[in-house]
Amino acid sequence: MRAYRLRSHLLLPALMAVLLSSGIGPDHARASNSAPAFVQNVIYSNKIAIFSKSYCPYCMRAKLIFSELREQPHVVELDLREDGSEIQRALLDLTGRRTVPQVFVNGKLVGGSDDLTAAFMSGQLQKLLSSS
């Protein structure tokens, strides 16, 4: 019995290491069972969250703004995920918007690219970032 406990105790860390090294982890988990929960988790677990599409020029502009501010956003590239359309539907339900990017800072919706640019230019984005 003791040998079984020891082996199962060693198996879990080994399994986690394999999953993480293969790119299967919290960021890669499917959101199909609960896309709204996934979206909420991303928004509230990260200082900056961007729901994006990798080819979108407006999304690239949003990421560039944070790069200029030397901030590292958590980016969810919807077009690179099997469940991207489900996540996008959950964002529509949450924000009333289907477009990308959708940018959140400290759990608050900043908006899309134009909203983010305006907040950056006015200094409101920097204030929001420093209020964490």
Image (tube, helix red, strand yellow):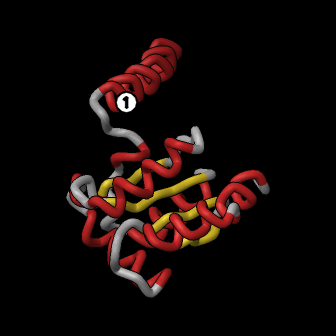
Q: Position of residue 61 (x, y in %)?
A: 39, 56
In the picture, measured across the screen, residue 130 lies left or right of residue 89, that is right
Query: Label 1: which residue?
Result: 20
Q: Hey, which residue is sitting farthest front in the picture?
A: 121
Residue at x 56% of width, y 64% of height? 104
Q: Nearer the viewer, residue 94 or 22?
A: 94
Q: Residues within 10 Å of mark 1 (few under 14, many from 20)?
A: few
Say if 4 sits above or below 74 in the image: above
Residue 107 occupies which quadrant of the picture?
bottom right
Examine the rendered structure and indicate whether residue 21 appears above or below residue 101: above
The picture places residue 35, in percent across and down from the top left corner, at: 39, 69
Residue type for callout 1: Leu
Element carrying mark 1: helix
The image quarter containing residue 30 is bottom left
Please name the residue shown 53% across and 41% down the image.
72
Left/right placement of residue 30 relative to residue 26 reads left
Left or right: where does residue 59 sit relative to residue 83? right
- The part of the image, by quadrant, that contains residue 11 is top left
> Farthest residue in the right direction?
131
Which residue is at the front of the view, 123 or 102? 123
- Exactly how many numbered labels are in the figure? 1
The answer to whether residue 51 is above or below residue 109 is: above
- Viewer-closest of 46 and 53: 53
Residue 33 screen position, x and y as percent: 34, 67
Q: Which residue shows up at 31% across the image and 66% down it?
A: 32
Please report the residue visible at 44 percent of the width from the left and 27 percent of the height from the top. Answer: 12
